[in-house]
Image (cartoon, rainbow, N blue to C red):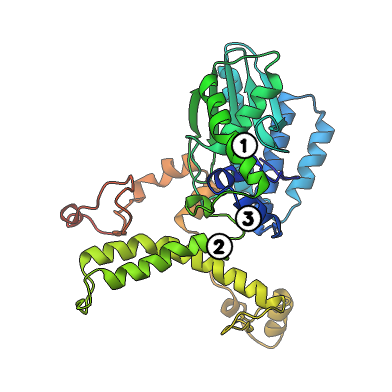
Amino acid sequence: MGPGKHALLGPSSAARWLNCTPSARLEEAVPNEGTKYTREGTLAHALGELKLRNYFTVMNKRTFNAQMKKLKADELYSSEMDGHTERYFDFARELALAFPSQPVLEIEDSLDLSRWVPEGFGTADLVLLSSETLHVVDFKYGQGHAVSAERNPQLMLYALGAYEKYRMFYQPETIRMSVFQPRIREEAGTWEITRTELLQWAEEVVKPAAALAFAGEGEPVPGDHCLFCRVKGQCRACSAPYASAAEDFAKLDGPKAPALLSDREIGKALALAEPLAAWLASVKDYALGAVLEGREIPGWKAVEGRSVRRFTDQDAAFDALKAHGVAEEILYERVPLTLAQAEKAVGKADFQLFAGAFIEKPRGKPALVPEGDPRPAFSPAAADFQPLA
């Protein structure tokens, strides 16, 4: 979903308010401040939308060129973004062509969710619909967090809204949902359920949770859904696992605990490390904001951080140096592009064709991850025969 007005119980935050119903009202009091990454995502959505509208709707060339020029003038625009949105366009076109007959196709489709969610609404990036199939697509430009289509409540709510909007004319049995996240995956992730399963989820899961969330009721429940919560730095429920873990460590081996932690204790500590670091970062962000607003956080204060000198006008500075006898060769260095930069400049196909024989991909260095990680376990024996990167 692109930018614009957001509902209190919007699809984009559904994973949060469905699991932790008080969170929506708690977040309501905290401004949703944009970042460079959200602005970048907004621009990518606008670029992708323009390309889709140019192909699927009536748009004259002059209008398209003017809008494209405006988007390209944004400082966050890049050729990489253009390439990723082109892949999004290709994916959408292939989906439309795969339907047996021409589907209903809506771009940035405004959807009403109030049948299940009080004052609920949202905007789906792309909706394709026939009498047999409803397909909802969400274009995500972020690269810090991989998003799965499977049981994705945001996409399921979009599908519900699309079904509700068009049900007088279409009763599709197959509900298909895709996440297109080009900076993380080459291919889109797609998942499907039946119309009956979707409506059952809406009645049994969404409706009761949404009623609690709208009222600000229910119990706080910490979990992976807290990742983008604006109040997690203050949330008592988020802090509880770490406080109880500290008590557990004190009790593990009784009053005569050995000086060194056992491997079992190390395993417990590692399980806490990543979520604890993320939570502490949120706590520090909150505390800094509070201090800068003039509030007191006992034992802490804000100070000016380190900064790095920079040119106010590099060209003028170099001209002044050269005018005083500094050789130009001293001021500039010739540095080869990295492999990734060269591939991007030449193009993936030509780069592989002409330089592929001179490229190798050594094994990566061992990394410690949770046991449930889908990657195969590292084999020290196999590593003896290959250099590590």
Q: Could you tell whether 29 is left or right of 274 in the image?
A: right
Q: Which residue is mark 3?
A: 37
Residue 87 visible in the snapshot: no
In the image shown, does 7 or 47 lie closer to the viewer? Answer: 7
Q: Please, what is the three-letter code of the amino acid marked with disc 3? A: Tyr
**Where residue 362 appears, x then y in whole percent?**
30, 54
Query: Helix, strand, or loop for circle 2?
Result: loop
Mark 1 vs mark 3, CA separation in Å: 20 Å
Query: Helix, strand, or loop for circle 3?
Result: helix
Q: Which residue is mark 2?
A: 235
Q: Considering only order in the chain, which callout, 3 or 2, is on the residue closer to the N terminus? A: 3
Q: Quadrant of the N terminus?
A: top right
In the image shown, does 295 or 351 lie closer to the viewer? Answer: 295
Category of crowding for the residue at label 1, using alpha-carbon neighbours closer than 10 angstroms: few (below 14), some (14–19), many (at least 20): some
Q: Please, what is the three-letter code of the amino acid marked with disc 1? A: Glu
Q: Which residue: 65% across, 81% down?
A: 296
Q: Which residue is mark 1?
A: 86
Tag nearer the camera, 1 or 3: 3
Q: Which residue: 57% across, 80% down?
A: 330
Residue 254 visible in the snapshot: yes
**Where residue 17 appears, x then y in whole percent?**
59, 46
